[in-house]
Image: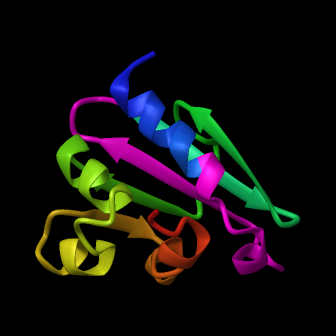
Amino acid sequence: MSAIQGLFDTMTGRFNSAAAAGLEAVFQYKLDEGDCYYAAISGGSCVLGKGEHDSPSVVLMMDSQTFKEILAGETNGMQAFMAGRIRADGDIMLATRLEALFPAS
């Protein structure tokens, strides 16, 4: 298992189903190093998958270092976006909910 896969696996353990109430969305992650993963949220649950989803709600593009820092709580996702370290395509407002959906430990 890659280190990136391990990071995505930790997201499952942090998933806050209360924050996902009523949310139907797919967050697609495209890392600059070539890894693609997605988090599909529906019915208060989250399914993580490897690869590209057919119809993501929002696509987030960044390097793996930025992704690691955000998951570790070292970097704020919104600040990283404003600094140009994260690029987004699709429903960008959805991305603002990620911190509540997957709180840092």
Total marks placed: 0
- Please tell me whether residue 76 is drawn above or below residue 52 in the rendered image: below
- Does 20 lie within the magenta span? yes
Q: Residue furthest left?
A: 83
Q: Residue at x 48, y 84 (%)?
A: 93
Q: Residue furthest front?
A: 105
Q: Residue at x 11, y 76 (%)?
A: 83
- Please tell me whether residue 82 is drawn above or below residue 25 in the rendered image: below
Q: Residue furthest right?
A: 43
Question: In the image, is 105 to the left or to the right of 26?
Answer: left
Question: In the image, is 65 to the left or to the right of 5?
Answer: left
Q: Residue at x 53, y 44 (%)?
A: 10
Percent of width and height locating residue 45: 81, 58
Question: In the image, is 60 to the left or to the right of 22?
Answer: left
Which range of residues does the magenta coloring cover?
12-35
Q: Quadrant of residue 100?
A: bottom right
